[in-house]
């Protein structure tokens, strides 16, 4: 993104930045990129009168259920989001109500293993077989999906006369790693202001990496702090969702 704002508008934006500060931010310098969290896997064993699960808690996001039918008859597998206790689901005849169902594996034979991958939001869930009478026989187990850990996003920043180019101008809240390079001929820096931190002053051809933790969604203004550069167009906005 190349940002070019007139001197008057740029001055107003910079004044607002100074007056309001940059809330919810902390800055550290780092050369190491954190690994992305692995997807969650839940192993489920279905017996004729019970469910066994390898875990009762997973973080929000993609979850893969590996489901083995260890019973003596066909069973199905349903993932149900509900605030009701797993022993007290609403019933419709011989089956539990499937209001809130997020996905299922249709009935399959004893001895078989099947997989189901879903993207789950935080909340309470019940895993069950909902063939007639099976839930009442005890074929269920509870699962809690917790809020996912804050994400880490990488943004490449190119600085030049007189502007910035970012690989992303909208990022999720959490940790953002900025890889900044001065592709111009004059010294530049990339700064969120005195409270937000930024890169060191970089000579032409030099680069640096720094990390910012955005705890609060909003719009964050960045500038080059060299005198006159912000007024000449080295200013922009990063949107944090």
Image: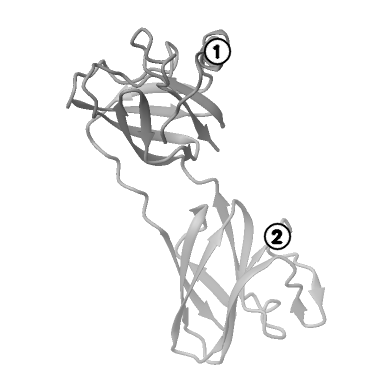
35 or 73, which is in the foreground? 35
Q: Earlier in the sequence, mark 2 or mark 1?
A: 1
Q: Is residue 230 above or below residue 152?
A: above
Q: Position of residue 156 (x, y in %)?
A: 32, 37
Dot 1 alpha-carbon crowd within 10 angstroms: few under 14, some 14 to 19, many 20 or more? few
Query: Dividing the image into 4 quarters, which one contains the C terminus?
Result: top right
| Residue at the spot 27% in from the left edge and 17% down from the top edge | 200
Residue 45 in percent (x, y) is at 48, 75
In depth, the one of 201 and 119 nearer the eye is 201
Q: Is residue 138 above or below residue 39?
A: below
Residue at image point 29% right, 26% down: 160
Residue 175 pos. (x, y %)? 41, 34
The quadrant in which the N terminus is found is: top left
Residue 82: image tag: 2
Q: Residues within 10 Å of mark 2 (few under 14, many from 20)?
A: some
Which of the 4 image quarters holds residue 29? top left
Check disc 2 and report its element: helix, strand or loop: loop
Residue projecting furthest to the left: 205
What residue did someone put label 1 on? 8
Residue projecting furthest to the right? 93
Residue 21 position (above or below residue 63)? above
Q: Is residue 33 above or below residue 121?
A: above
| Colouring | one colour
Camera-side residue: 60 or 85?
A: 60
Picture mark count: 2
Q: Which residue is pictured at 50% across the width and 55% down the height?
A: 61
- Tell us which disc is closer to us: 2 or 1: 1
């Amino acid at each position: 993104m190349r940002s070019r704002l007139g001197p008057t508008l740029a001055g107003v934006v910079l004044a607002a930045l100074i007056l309001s500060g940059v809330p919810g931010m902390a800055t550290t310098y780092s050369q190491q990129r954190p690994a992305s969290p692995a997807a969650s896997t839940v192993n489920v064993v279905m017996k004729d009168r019970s469910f066994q699960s390898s875990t009762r808690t997973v973080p929000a996001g993609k979850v893969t259920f590996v489901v083995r039918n260890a019973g003596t008859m066909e069973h199905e597998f349903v993932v149900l989001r509900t605030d009701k206790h797993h022993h007290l689901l609403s019933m419709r005849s011989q089956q539990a109500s499937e209001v809130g169902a997020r996905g299922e594996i249709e009935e399959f034979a004893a001895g078989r293993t099947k997989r189901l991958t879903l993207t789950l939001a935080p909340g309470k869930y019940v895993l069950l077989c909902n063939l007639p009478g099976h839930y009442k026989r005890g074929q269920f187990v509870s699962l809690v999906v917790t809020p996912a850990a804050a994400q880490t996003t990488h943004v490449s920043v190119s600085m030049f006369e007189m502007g910035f180019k970012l690989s992303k101008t909208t990022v999720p809240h959490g940790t953002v790693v900025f890889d900044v390079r001065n592709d111009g001929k004059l010294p530049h820096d990339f700064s969120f202001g005195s409270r937000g931190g930024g890169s060191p002053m970089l000579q032409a051809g030099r680069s640096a990496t720094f990390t910012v933790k955005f705890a609060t969604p909003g719009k964050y203004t960045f500038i080059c702090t060299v005198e006159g550069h912000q007024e000449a167009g080295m200013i922009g906005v990063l949107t944090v969702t």
